Structure formats: structure tokens, C-alpha cells
Image: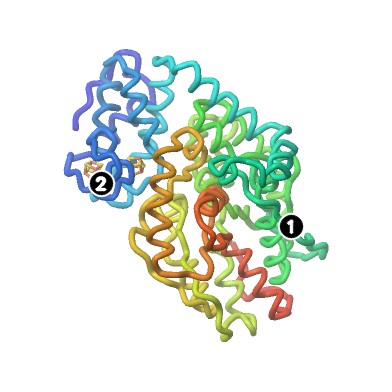
Amino acid sequence: MQTQLADFLEDTPAGREAAAIVGNCVHCGFCTATCPTYQLLGDELDGPRGRIYLIKQVLEGATPTAATQLHLDRCLGCLGCETTCPSGVQYGRLLDIARPLVAQRVQRPATQSLLRRTLRAGLLGRAFAPALRLAQALRPLLPATLREQVPATQDSGAWPTRVHPRRMLLLAGCVQPAMLPNIDAATARVFDALGIQLVVEPRAGCCGALPRHLDDPDGALNMARRNIDAWWPQLEAGCEAIVVNASGCGAHVAEYSWLLRHDAAYAHRAERVSALARDPCELLPGLLAGHRGAAGRRGPRVAFHPPCSLQHGRKIRGVVESMLATLGCEVLPFAEAHLCCGAAGSYSLTQPAIARALRERKLGHLERVEPELILSANVGCIAHLQGGTTVPVMHWIEWLDQRLAADAFPSGPGPDTFA
Ligand code: SF4
Ligand code: SF4
């Protein structure tokens, strides 16, 4: 598709990049078959090909409308379309360029603007943890629709205190420590058992994905810069990697290099930070391999829901499932594992009807195979899915933590040195 850039975009790097991405699309429509919103709504403009067409119009100078914005807002950013596309269209980056262009020129309804402002302030501010604790205390009294948005209180257990020569950073993030604190603690315990100390840098915080989803791209960039500044001395002092156990945040940190590519003061360091960001599943199979007790005991029947950020964003597929199978779990295949569950960052709060429909569809497939546990790799997916099922949902590393504790797993350095 040839794009005739409008005057206001002609000499901009973002405009040229967007036109080049659109230029790779050959309209084949293969992507519509794997787009969750197209599957649900059946409207071409709620599929990737239609959204690319809408974006092309904006790039060429057409005035975006509320309808343009609605179709882009309904996009989950799941990147299922990128996995399917035979032409390598980088839809996610195109969407990232287009959304602010539309947001600058379309006034959202007051209720929508207020919701986004409230979510930015509420989820990222200091008041989030006490507000969540209050909601958890009142949870039994809440109506069902509200109750399912509030995860039950979770005990995180002890944080390891041993010091190891091998150290890695851990991104604690913004909502996860308050919502599901056991995920970080379990990650620290698992790495500790394998001879690696995880360090949480207190000046780091939200990766920036939430403000990026909520119409604040500048705020997102500033958070990326703050994290780079916070982590840099630790990386210089020998931390080997940045462990990110929420795959949505991991996919975003991996994008720092692209997001800050035009920022001369940060581009170089952003590239290194992105290169060192690791989902725990990229590190643990190698670390576990040399330890007795890592295999051989029968585990539960589990269904692993691969978050879109892991399978489509980071393009990591089958790794967690293989590790779980090696550790004795019966890993149950289920239908439509490639489709989004509807959580998608703040999407379940801004597009609740679609998010709920996608969750019902996902849980239908998951529950049909009758797992004892549903495992996943992203805090948003875990909380969203748990809100709709009585089957326990947890991060796979929490299960691994329990398993290692039950085995009284021997500690010591793993065989692989991460470089
Ligand atoms: S990112 Fe996901 S929801 Fe958006 S167009 Fe692509 S497949 Fe559809
Ligand atoms: S699959 Fe790729 S090339 Fe085909 S319509 Fe979708 S984005 Fe365009």
C-alpha cells in the first residue's frame, strides 16, 4: 500500500516509518482470522487490515473521527496479527505511532477522558496499594462484577536474604507488588535456590506500558528513562540481566530501544537495557538443568495460558510448557491458545464488555480440558482470568517455587553463565 504522507508528517521520522510499515501490507487479510476483536465483532474495521486502512487515511491527512478512535481503542495490542502476517507488517509499531496522532485530534467524551486520567493516577500513584487493601477488606460485600476485579489478599512469604556473587535485577513494576505480591517473592526464592540474587532497584518503577495504553506516551517515555537511570549503575556493577516476570512489562522493556531510538541521551543505554531484559523462562530451563531433583516427580494437570506479550510480543513459544513437562506436569493442550484473554493491560477497564467476552471464550477452552491449575506468565492475565473461574490461576513461577520448596531443592550455582 503506497501512502502519500500529509504535509504535517512528510518530514518526520515517525511519518516515514509509519508509511514504510503500511507499505508492507498487501491486503491479504490472513491476519483477520487470528484477530480476537474481528473474531468477536465481525467488522473489518475491528480487524488489523481495516485498522491499517484507517491509519493510512490519517497519515494521508484525513481528519480522524470518533469512529476512527473507537476502532483503534478496541484493538488489544495483542500482536496476534503480527504472528500471522506473512509480509512481516509491524502492526504494533504502526499502532503506537497512530494512536497519539488520533488522540491529539479527536476529543474523547468527558467520561472516557476522566476514566483514563483516573486510571493513570489510580494505578500508578501511591494511593493504589492502600485503596486495593481497602477494596480487599470489603471484597465479600462487593457486587459480583466489582468483586471479580479485586484479587483476594495474597501472602507473599519470605524474601530470601542470602547474598550470591551472581546478581540480576528484578523489575517489581507498579500494580503487581500490591495485587499479587507472591509473584516477585516466588521469583526471588527460585533464583536464590539456583544461586542468583535478585536485586530490586527502588528508584525503578512502572515500565511505562500502562501510561502508553492510556494516552500518555510522553509519561511512558519518562518512565523508561527513569528506569534506565535507576538500573544503569547496577548493570555497570555486574548485574547480569533484568528479570521481568510480567510478560507485558517484559515486552515493553524490550521495546525501550525502539521507543527511545531518537533520544540521543538514552538511545545507547536503552538498547543495552532492552537486550538484557529477560523473562524468567528464558533463564530458568538452563539453570534448572544441572540440578538433581529438577525432574522426575509427577506434577499436576495444568493448562498454560501463554500471554500475548510472551507469544506474540517476545515471540517466546513453548518454552514454559516444555519446562513444566520436564518438571513432571501434564501440560494440557487447549483450543485457541493463540487468542488474547482480554486482559491486555488496562483494556479490561477501558473496554470491559469485549474483555469479558474474550475471557469467557478463553475460560471455556481452558476449563474444557479440566486442569487442576491454570498457569500463566503475566499479572494482568492472571488477575483477569481468576475473576471468571474457580480453578486456581497463578504464575508458573509460583508453582515452581512451591515445587522447589516441597523438594527441599538444593541451592547452588546453575551450570549456565548468562552473558
Ligand atoms: S493487535 Fe490484536 S486486536 Fe489489534 S488488530 Fe492485531 S490481532 Fe487484532
Ligand atoms: S496479514 Fe499482513 S499483509 Fe496481510 S492484510 Fe494483514 S497486515 Fe496486511
Q: Nearer the viewer, residue 74 or 215?
A: 74
- Ligand 2 under 8 Å from disc 2 Cβ: yes
Confirm or deny contact between disc 1 and disc 2 (CB under 8 A): no
- State the SS at label 2: helix
Q: Please rate how many residues cluster around mark 2, counting C-alpha atoms within 10 Å: few if below 14, some from 14 to 19, many from 20.
A: many
**Left or right of 397, for residue 199:** right
In what quadrant of the picture does the N terminus appear?
A: top left
Q: Earlier in the sequence, mark 1 or mark 2?
A: 2
Q: How far across and down, in percent of the image, does residue 180 sit? A: 66, 52
Q: Which sits in the foreground, 286 or 109?
A: 109
- The picture places residue 305, in percent across and down from the top left corner, at 46, 60
The image shows residue 235, relative to residue 53, as above or below, that is below
191 relative to 38, above or below: below
Q: Which residue is tagged 2? A: 31
Q: Secondary structure at mark 1?
A: loop
At x 30%, y 43%, the residue is: 40
Q: Quadrant of ligand 1?
A: top left
| Mark seen at residue 269 | none
Q: Which amino acid, mark 1?
A: Asp
Colour convention of the picture:
rainbow
> Dot 1: few (<14), some (14–19), or many (≥20) neighbours within 10 Å?
few
The answer to which image quadrant residue 397 occupies is: bottom right
Classify the position of the C terminus by image quarter.
Answer: bottom right
Q: What residue is drawn where x is 58% and y is 68%?
A: 284
Which residue appears at 22% of the width and 26% of the height?
3
Which residue in the protein does label 1 denote? 155
